[in-house]
């Protein structure tokens, strides 16, 4: 029997991926995936939460439009955890607008790849419930890939994901600098004089 070329339409299942853990690199990993997908001709939406209104580090992604689009709904210039309680209440409204935008994107299948950066952090601080995340995952179009990032992984999401990568800190280099006759050991939050 002679085989001939047969056109086969293969529908690629959109996976649900989670990058979690205390280590740095979760957002960077998701951005790397965004670049790969954009290179494959896919439309990528990145929605960032809890990082404030703007960081210059993402300006270069504007050059990748229309394949990669970045959305932020927060109005403050600082990270969420750095805000006063009153500012957090105000910012919660903006974040909820972002969550509603995500629901709309999923319901109409507006992109091929949806990256929800620090979305798991919204569960940690109580803006959304883990059940909301499960509902979102289950309602996504079959071909849409969804990537969630955040420090903590709720147990209820383990069975909802196709791929989970945990990024942990194995070693953390502290910066040391000399101030006068004293040495300072610096980390992200404070300085210790030794």
Image (cartoon, rainbow, N blue to C red):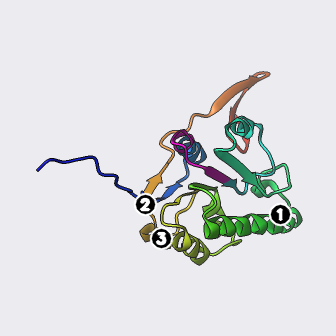
Which residue does the numbered mark 1 point to in the structure image? Answer: 91
Q: Is residue 194 visible?
A: no
Please report whichever mark, 2 or 3, sits nearer to the chain's N-terminal start.
2
Indicate the secondary structure of the residue bearing disc 3: helix
Tell me the CA gap for discs 2 and 1: 35 Å
Tell me the CA gap for discs 3 and 1: 27 Å
Q: Is residue 61 above or below residue 93?
A: above
Query: Residue at the location (51% across, 73% down)?
Result: 138
Q: Quadrant of residue 66?
A: top right
Disc number placed over residue 44 in the picture, else none: none
Q: Quadrant of residue 35?
A: top right
Which residue does the numbered mark 2 point to in the structure image? Answer: 13
Q: Give coordinates of residue 149: x percent, y percent.
A: 58, 56
Q: Which region is colored magenta? A: 35-46
Q: Is residue 145 above or below residue 5?
A: below
Q: Is residue 61 visible?
A: yes
Badge count: 3
Indicate the secondary structure of the residue bearing disc 1: helix
Query: Residue at the location (60% across, 47% down)?
Result: 27
Verify whether residue 36 appears in magenta: yes
Disc number placed over residue 155 in the picture, else none: 3
Please report whichever mark, 3 or 1, sits nearer to the chain's N-terminal start.
1
Label 3 environment density (alpha carbons within 10 Å; few <14, some 14–19, many ≥20): few
Q: Give coordinates of residue 175: x percent, y percent.
A: 65, 30
* Residue in front for this viewpoint, 56 or 107: 107
């Amino acid at each position: 029997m002679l085989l001939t070329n047969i056109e086969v339409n293969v529908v690629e299942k959109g996976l649900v991926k989670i990058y979690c853990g205390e280590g740095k690199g979760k957002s960077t990993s998701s951005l790397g995936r965004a670049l790969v997908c954009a290179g494959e001709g896919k439309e990528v939406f990145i929605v960032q939460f809890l990082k404030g209104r703007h960081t210059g580090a993402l300006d270069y992604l504007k050059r990748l439009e229309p394949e990669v689009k970045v959305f932020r709904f927060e109005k403050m210039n600082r990270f969420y955890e750095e805000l006063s309680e009153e500012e957090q209440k105000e910012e919660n409204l903006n974040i909820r607008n972002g969550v509603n935008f995500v629901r709309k994107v999923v319901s109409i299948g507006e992109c091929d790849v949806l990256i929800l950066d620090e979305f798991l952090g919204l569960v940690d601080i109580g803006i959304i419930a883990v059940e909301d995340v499960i509902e979102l995952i289950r309602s996504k179009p079959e071909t849409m890939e969804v990537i969630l990032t955040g420090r903590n992984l709720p147990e209820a999401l383990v069975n909802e994901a196709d791929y989970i990568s945990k990024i942990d800190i194995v070693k953390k280099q502290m910066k040391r600098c000399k101030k006068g006759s004293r040495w300072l050991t610096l980390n992200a939050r404070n300085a210790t004089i030794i």
